[in-house]
Image (tube, helix red, strand yellow):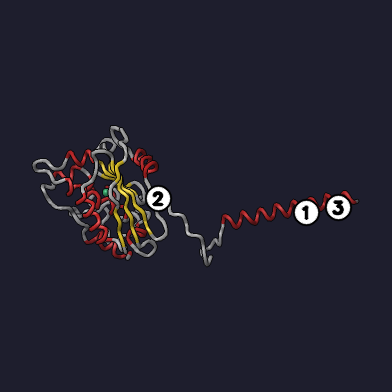
């Protein structure tokens, strides 16, 4: 009789352990659950989402009122100071931030590749990126690599929600010669265009106020004069831009951005 009651208590005790474990795991997977928790822990910012996924973080000042941009480049691929200043002007014009800090570009070793795939570039970011989003400061990353993109004429890509890459060799090939636009004009145009993608343009995170989505060409604008026209980040575009000026966001894209602010 005695031993039976001991067994009973052991059983009861193990049941209590199991049920308390169950309770713990329930509350871990569902902390507050319905968004009504008065003081939830801040969610960790992910830097590996798709371009456009952090459109509001870029465009508005509600959650992040400061922006820092880290620029890294491979030997021979340093962007012009003027291009960086032009990017700053563009960002100040379209983002609602109290401060925008672009740090002095930092040289990193060559990737020693014939050409770069998005996978190669993600690996490089993983290896070299220093600044991450913290508190109310959104961090963005830009990398200038010393070779072309895969095997076509692309000059820049947005590859994560805060990250863009630029293909210096291709930019240099099509700039600075007789009848070619300057390197600054090309860099500025491609810089601005890729940041347009981080801002969720076109119809890629940021809702359209009017239909201007060139859906057969990805997240681009149907307006040929717009910064977000599909060919703007390719060498084809610059072949027709004699000396010219940097294209700006046209009304449809500006309206989409302003609707969020
Ligand atoms: Zn584009």
Give me the C-alpha separation between circle 3 and circle 1.
10 Å
Seen in the picture, residue 130 relative to 88 is either above or below; the reply is above
Q: In the drawing, does residue 217 fall left or right of residue 26?
A: left
Quarter of the picture holding the C terminus? bottom left
Residue pointed to by mark 2: 47
Residue pointed to by mark 3: 5
Task: Give coordinates of residue 117: x percent, y percent.
Answer: 32, 38
Query: Which numbered circle lies on residue 12?
Result: 1
* Residue mark closest to the camera, 1 vs 2: 2
Q: In the drawing, does residue 176 fall left or right of residue 110?
A: left
User: Does dot 3 land on a helix, a strand or a loop?
Assistant: helix
Seen in the picture, residue 176 relative to 32 is either above or below; the reply is above
Q: In the drawing, does residue 153 fall left or right of residue 141?
A: left
Query: Which numbered circle lies on residue 157?
Result: none
The first of marks 1 and 2 along the sequence is 1
Q: Residue furthest right?
A: 1
The image shows a total of numbered marks equal to 3
The first of marks 3 and 1 along the sequence is 3
């Amino acid at each position: 009789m005695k031993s039976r009651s001991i067994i009973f208590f052991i059983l009861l005790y193990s049941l209590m352990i199991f049920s308390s474990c169950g309770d713990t795991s329930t509350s871990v997977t569902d902390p507050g659950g319905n968004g009504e928790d008065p003081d939830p822990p801040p969610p960790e910012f992910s830097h590996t989402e798709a371009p456009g996924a952090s459109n509001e973080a870029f465009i508005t000042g509600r959650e992040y009122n400061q922006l820092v941009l880290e620029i890294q480049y491979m030997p021979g691929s340093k962007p012009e100071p003027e291009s960086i200043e032009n990017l700053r002007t563009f960002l100040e014009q379209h983002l609602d931030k109290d401060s925008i800090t672009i740090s002095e570009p930092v040289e990193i070793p060559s990737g020693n590749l014939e050409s770069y795939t998005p996978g190669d570039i993600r690996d490089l970011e993983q290896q070299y990126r220093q600044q991450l989003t913290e508190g109310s400061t959104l961090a963005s990353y830009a990398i200038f690599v010393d070779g072309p993109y895969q095997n076509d004429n692309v000059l820049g890509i947005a590859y994560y929600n805060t990250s863009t890459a630029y293909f210096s060799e291709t930019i240099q090939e099509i700039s600075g010669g007789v009848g070619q636009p300057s390197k600054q004009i090309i860099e500025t145009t491609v810089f601005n265009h890729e940041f347009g993608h981080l801002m969720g343009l076109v119809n890629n995170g940021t809702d359209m106020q009017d239909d201007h989505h060139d859906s057969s060409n990805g997240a681009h604008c149907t307006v040929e004069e717009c910064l977000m026209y599909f060919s703007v980040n390719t060498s084809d575009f610059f072949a027709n831009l004699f000396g010219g000026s940097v294209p700006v966001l046209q009304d449809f894209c500006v309206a989409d951005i302003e609707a969020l602010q």
